[in-house]
Image (cartoon, rainbow, N blue to C red):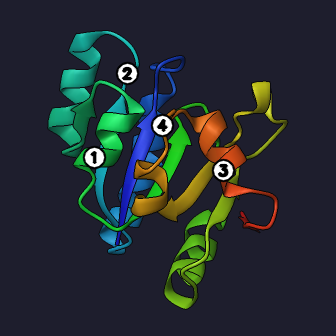
Amino acid sequence: MLSVIVEATDAGDRLPALLAALTSAAVDGLVREVLIVGGGPAELLEVLREETGAELAQDLAEAIRLARSERLLVMPATIRLRGGWLEKLGGHVRSSADDALIVGEGSAFMGRSYGLLMARTAASGLVRSDLKHLRGKLGRGAARLA
């Protein structure tokens, strides 16, 4: 099972759509919890937290510390997941412990159209935790999914 961390600092308006997409992964038993970092008006975040059971964190480093699963899926709220993403992610998680990139639809808007699947221990050891730095740490050898 995965802990999903959604970095929503710049895209609170896209957050509801991503949380809806993650619901199917939770129903399938792939997602254990969702943590939201930043993103939008406090009222919106509170409603989303109540409706989805997601938790809030002040920053990515705190979300990594709070995560209960050993594997993390970190993604921006701006990502538009491709069709078949859940099957590809589930297959990868069941067959491999390797890191992976979840590539979103369309162009890489500001280099952030991807999610990262990685071990919590690797992410928690980083001094500087942001999505771009995590991707750099992940390296070019990671599997590309969806």
Cα–Cα span, label 3 and label 4: 11 Å
Q: Amino acid at mark 4?
A: Val
Q: Which residue is mark 2?
A: 38
Cα–Cα span, label 1 and label 3: 18 Å
Q: Which residue is mark 1?
A: 65
Total marks drawn? 4
Label 3 crowd bin: few (<14), some (14–19), many (20+), radius 10 Å: few
Provide residue 85's location: percent of width, then percent of height: 62, 64
Cα–Cα span, label 2 and label 3: 22 Å
Residue at (54% x, 17% y) in the render:
10
Q: Which mark is residue 137?
A: 3
Q: Is residue 37 above or below residue 126?
A: above
Q: Amino acid at mark 3?
A: Lys
Q: Which residue is mark 4?
A: 127
Foreground: disc 2 or disc 3: 3
Tag 3's secondary structure?
A: helix
Q: Amino acid at mark 1?
A: Arg
Label 4 crowd bin: few (<14), some (14–19), many (20+), radius 10 Å: few
Q: Amino acid at mark 2?
A: Gly
